Image: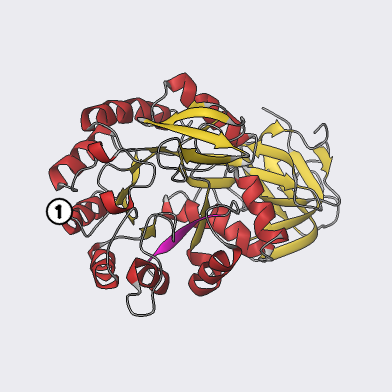
Amino acid sequence: MAPTKVLAGARVVLPTGTVDDGRVIVEGTRIAGGGPPGPEPAEGSGQAPVDAEQVDLSGHWLVPGFVDLHNHGGGGASFAGGTAEDVLKGVHTHRAHGTTTVVASAVTGDLDFLARHAGMLAELAQQGDIAGIHFEGPFISPCRKGAHDEQLLRDPDPAEVRKLVDAAHGQARMMTLATELPGGLDSVRLLAEHGVIAAVGHTDATYEQTLLAIDAGATVATHLFNAMPPLGHRAPGPIAALLEDERVTVELINDGTHLHPAALQLAFHHAGPDRVAFITDAMDAAGFGDGRYMLGTLEVEVADGVARLVEGGSIAGSTLTLDRAFKRAVTVDGLPVEGVVAAISANPARLLGLDDRIGSLEPGKDADLVVLDAGFDLVGVMRRGEWVIDPRTA
């Protein structure tokens, strides 16, 4: 067994607040303790043994590992259509940027292909490489299709929704729907019955139609503001309904392209830090570079880090990593560190039903954590007690 590690001297963000000069004790794959500095533990005290490995993190921040609900790939590899090896390449790319838990997101495709691909992703989820599957499409509105192939879109027939859920072998975590389409509300109810998050997105719904979806069991807004009608003073549309309802968590892509800072501030402060989940909506180019890529069946050009469809120019996912989203939230948007930690770790962990294992630095949970320097640049990542990036050598 690996020696006990004592990570000491950092500003540690705990569920109860930030502790200066704090410490986290890691035993094996789990967090064994932590909090403010204390006297050197005596042998047999139940705390870290005297011969524990000491890691000095003075001048750094220590936060929980990031949890990404909505991610299509990275490192030049696709979650949406790649092989198992491709998916693992993308997972490891994002892990090196602090995302210790990632849900693999599919995009619109042929229903049989999506079912087969879900079977492969389910195996990776069962192995613990990913935290499950998110189906973004094909049950979305052609009016708000974004970077989805319109020819493959379809109304959300509950029988077809069930087919994809079954194909995921218990690993379906979320499905994005345009709930105003025929079959939409029944599909939301079906997903809720099977423990799958129903997310409102790529939707042309009215305010009133969105309220019906929430009452039917929808609990997430897929990348709020994007791929839905704008907020209007006479026709408030889905944005107002999703922001005002305490049952809904809103996804936000904080890359400086998808959202104006004022829109992000509006959502964060209206919903509150407990109802926001920062996501990447990343595609293959995340952590890789500019060039030509495929997103599902559509060709994407990435230039200066911005991904757009070759035909039509719609934004096609992002090249964001969650360490960049964290830094931007604090240094550009001026959000409190504790609120950002909630949005990037605790809230998505809770939505996934994994908050007993991940999402916060508490005893008994997986030793998934991120070390940031004083300027909020990533310098260390630990997953299940093993350094992915050791801050002493980074």
Residue 251 counted in the magenta span: yes
**As drawn, is 62 to the left or to the right of 267?**
right
Residue 320 counted in the magenta span: no
- Residue at the extreme bottom: 234
In this rendered view, identify the residue nearer to me: 46 or 172: 172
**Residue at x 53% of width, y 66% of height:** 263
Disc 1 on helix, strand or loop? loop
Rendered location of residue 210, percent (x, y): 28, 67
**Residue at x 52% of width, y 43% of height:** 318
Q: Quadrant of residue 14?
A: bottom right
Extent of the magenta region? 248-253
Rendered location of residue 319, percent (x, y): 56, 40
> Which residue is denoted by mark 1 in the rendering?
183
The N terminus sits in image quarter = top right
Q: Quadrant of residue 367?
A: top right
Main SS, magenta region, reads strand
